[in-house]
């Protein structure tokens, strides 16, 4: 089948919940993707910040193949070696004490919410606690995760959602303070807002919220699903700030393409939180994803991926600054590590479509931001290649 035939078939069969780009991707190598016509694309999206190791990493692929032949699934009624190793490595990378593996980011958020509520329930002897989340946040699409996602457009058709969720303004400490009451059990935000438009938390904000949490025995929940796993130059973005969450989530690059997420917590939280009967999953943390997570973390640590990210990010940042200097349509440049955004004043969807035609995969965030979340293994030459294509697109469109 050619691209058109594939797309026609897809639009007949799949529920139309995405306006997809008009390419059918078939294979990947390094930081490049190939469509069914054999056209090559430089990938600056990494499957939405997932494929941190790029494509066709032999060591990773081999670990998965070996696990496929050994054992895929057991359920959580039994122990299995790969996930035990994965948990140990996750703990080491995050400094957290307890891990629960899920199948997605959304489920990690669900678990984090339940963990916080249970903690407060055990402490206070009653339910009915509240959570403070942020405007313009994104935490997923299930009803719980949607309830803490500060986007009316996503929420409205599905109301009523979870009760007791209050929305503060991200990076505005006073707005958080104003919402705290006796029932507040957790404050939740992305360390770097992703879908909302690439907004890193300011140091004052994250330190201020952390202090408020300590003062009131409120749990700080950081969503590291997009910004975690080395992307900001530290394994988790909060490690750039010198604060530590009580509960955190990871997913996306955790399995580098295998569907897996996790929520983690400190021992202090775990002691009063979820116990047998409170939470579960059939697939979550099976041997297959365990093999993926442990191999990803092993490679990242051994190859000092965060050091590479720091260097690559400095170069990406410099080149994006040049684009901002050169093009009037670029209004702002912000981000952290290899999670960068260019806010532009021309239609952002058109820019990413034109880039795609020229062989560059680039996604958007919010309503007017070009998002740069490439595989973490990119080199300066790839940044230059991206620059040339995007420069040409912006020049054409201005
Ligand atoms: C992608 C994302 C989620 C949801 O993860 P899924 O795997 O799509 O369920 C939650 N939070 C953040 C910050 C994300 O970027």
Image (cartoon, grey):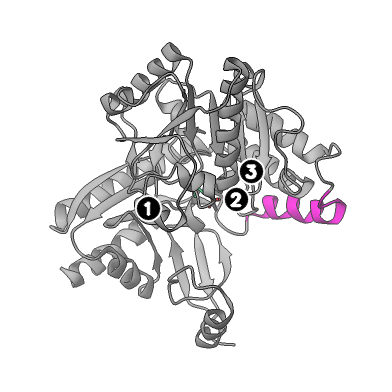
Does mark 1's beta carbon lie closer than 8 Å to ligand 1? no
Q: Residues within 10 Å of mark 3 (few under 14, many from 20)?
A: many
Closest to the observer: 9 or 133? Answer: 133
Q: Position of residue 153 (x, y in %)?
A: 36, 56
Residue 383, compared with residue 225, is above or below; it is below
Nearer-N-terminus badge (3/1): 3
Question: Residue 256's mark?
Answer: 2
Q: Secondary structure at mark 2?
A: loop
**Would you say 46 lies left or right of 96 here?**
left
Expressed as whole percent of the image width and height from the top left, the position of residue 211 reads 39, 15
Can residue 139 be spotted in the picture?
no
From the image, tell me which residue sits under label 3.
296
In the rendered image, the vertical position of residue 97 relative to residue 260, given as above or below = above
Is residue 79 depicted above or below 351 in this figure? above
Mark 2 and mark 3 in contact (Cβ < 8 Å)?
A: yes
Q: Earlier in the sequence, mark 2 or mark 1?
A: 2
Instruction: Count residues near mark 2 (Cα–Cα under 10 Å), then give few for <14, some for 14-19, many for 20+.
Output: many
Alpha-carbon distance for marks 3 and 2?
7 Å
Residue 372 numbered mark, or none: 1
Secondary structure under tag 1 reads: strand
Q: Would residue 177 be counted in the magenta stretch?
A: no
Work out whether residue 87 or residue 374 is closer to the camera in this orientation and state it.
Answer: 87
Give the residue drawn at x 32%, y 54%. Answer: 366
Is the shortest distance between ligand 1 and the CB of mark 2 under 8 Å? no
At a point 63% along the width and 47% down the height, the residue shown is 255
**Residue 284, picture quadrant:** top right
Which quarter of the rendered picture does the N terminus lie within? bottom right
**Residue at the left extreme of this rendering:** 328
Which of 378/216 is in front? Answer: 216
Range of magenta residues: 57-73
Secondary structure mostly taken by the magenta-highlighted segment of the chain = helix
């Amino acid at each position: 089948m050619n691209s058109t035939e594939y797309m026609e078939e897809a639009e007949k069969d799949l529920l139309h919940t995405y306006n997809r780009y008009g390419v059918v991707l078939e294979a990947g190598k390094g930081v490049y993707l190939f469509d069914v016509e054999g056209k090559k694309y430089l990938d600056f999206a990494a499957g939405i910040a997932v494929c941190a190791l790029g494509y066709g990493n032999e060591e990773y692929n081999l670990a998965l193949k070996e696990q496929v032949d050994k054992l895929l699934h057991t359920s959580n009624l039994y122990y299995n070696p790969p996930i035990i190793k994965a948990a140990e490595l996750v703990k080491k990378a995050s400094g957290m004490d307890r891990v629960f593996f899920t199948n997605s980011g959304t489920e990690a958020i669900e678990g984090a919410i339940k963990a916080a509520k249970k903690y407060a329930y055990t402490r206070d002897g009653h339910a009915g606690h509240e959570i403070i989340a942020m405007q313009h946040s994104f935490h997923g699409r299930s009803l719980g995760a949607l309830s803490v996602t500060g986007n009316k457009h996503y929420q409205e058709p599905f109301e009523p959602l979870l009760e007791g969720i209050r929305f503060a303004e991200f990076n505005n400490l006073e707005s958080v303070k104003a919402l705290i009451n006796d029932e507040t059990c957790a404050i939740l935000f992305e360390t770097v807002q992703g879908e909302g438009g690439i907004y890193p938390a300011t140091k004052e904000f994250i330190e201020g919220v952390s202090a408020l949490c300590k003062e009131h025995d409120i749990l700080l929940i950081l969503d590291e699903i997009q910004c975690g796993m080395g992307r900001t130059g530290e394994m988790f973005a909060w490690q750039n700030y010198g604060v530590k969450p009580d509960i955190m989530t990871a997913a996306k690059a955790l399995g580098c393409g295998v569907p897996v997420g996790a929520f983690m917590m400190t021992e202090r939280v775990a002691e009063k939180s979820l116990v047998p009967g409170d939470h579960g999953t059939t697939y979550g943390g099976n041997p297959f994803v365990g093999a993926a997570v442990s191999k990803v973390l092993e490679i990242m640590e051994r190859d000092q991926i965060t050091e590479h990210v720091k260097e690559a990010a400095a170069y990406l940042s410099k080149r994006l600054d040049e684009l901002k200097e050169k093009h009037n349509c670029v209004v702002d440049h912000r981000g952290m590590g290899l999670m960068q955004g260019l806010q532009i004043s021309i239609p952002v969807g058109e820019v990413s479509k034109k880039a795609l035609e020229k062989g560059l995969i680039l996604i958007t965030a919010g309503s007017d931001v070009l998002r740069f979340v490439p595989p973490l293994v990119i080199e300066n030459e790839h940044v230059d290649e991206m620059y040339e294509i995007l420069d040409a697109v912006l020049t054409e469109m201005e």
